[in-house]
Image (cartoon, rainbow, N blue to C red):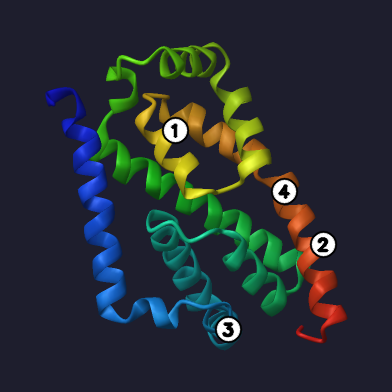
Amino acid sequence: MYKYRRLILVALFLALLLAGFQFSGLREHLSLQYLHDTLLAHKGWGLLLFALLFALGNLIQIPGWIFLAASVLALGRVWGGLATYLAATFSCCTTFVVIRLLGGSALRELDNRLARRIIAHLDERPVTVIALLRMLFQTVPALNYALSLSGVRFRHYLTGTLLGLPLPIAVYCLFFDYLGRALHLS
């Protein structure tokens, strides 16, 4: 049981954060339309609020594409993509720091062959593995939690994140820009 103490602490943190988010009424306000309107109404402060909401959303398992869609529809594909890239990087780093503080490198302590094999691959080429994972899964909250708990160094995490996010963000920007134009949303 001692071995799972940090994982239990992370799970409790997530449960409390989700409950607080739900009961505070924030869930009802965190929507594509709210993010879109916030970015349009307050260019400077809106970007800061956008990054903070992206970080909170990532911690409570809200997919990053919602933030990307809102920024592309509000700011266009270039500025929306840049805003999302910066906010997504901030969000991933925030998740890393918070979860690492709570959970340490708890996944390394598991006595599981599969976990050891995955971590061994991560240890061999951390930046490459993280960049590839980002290209495939972008800012998926579960990936952020797993990488945070894996014991990977922050500098490798940040470098892999910075290298892996641009391509999928660019593809999504083109998609949401096309969708917004086709549906007359932007």
The residue that appears at 85% across and 79% down in the rendered structure is 181
Callout 1–callout 2 Cβ contact below 8 Å: no
Q: Indicate whether 77 appears above or below 43.
A: above
Q: Secondary structure at mark 2?
A: helix
Percent x, y for residue 102? 23, 40
Mark 2 = which residue?
Answer: 174
**Label 1 – label 2 distance at C-alpha:** 28 Å
Mark 3 = which residue?
Answer: 33
* Residue type, mark 2 in image: Leu
Q: Upstream in the sequence, badge 1 or badge 3? A: 3
82 relative to 97 in the view: left or right: right
Percent x, y for residue 158? 51, 36
**Label 2 – label 4 distance at C-alpha:** 10 Å
Crowding around mark 2 (Cα neighbors within 10 Å: few <14, some 14 to 19, many 20+) is some
The residue that appears at 58% across and 67% down in the rendered structure is 67
Mark 1 = which residue?
Answer: 147
Q: Upstream in the sequence, badge 3 or badge 2? A: 3
The residue that appears at 43% across and 45% down in the rendered structure is 93
Callout 3–callout 2 Cβ contact below 8 Å: no
Q: Secondary structure at mark 1?
A: helix
Mark 4 = which residue?
Answer: 168
Numbered disc total: 4
Residue 129 visible somewhere in the drawing: yes
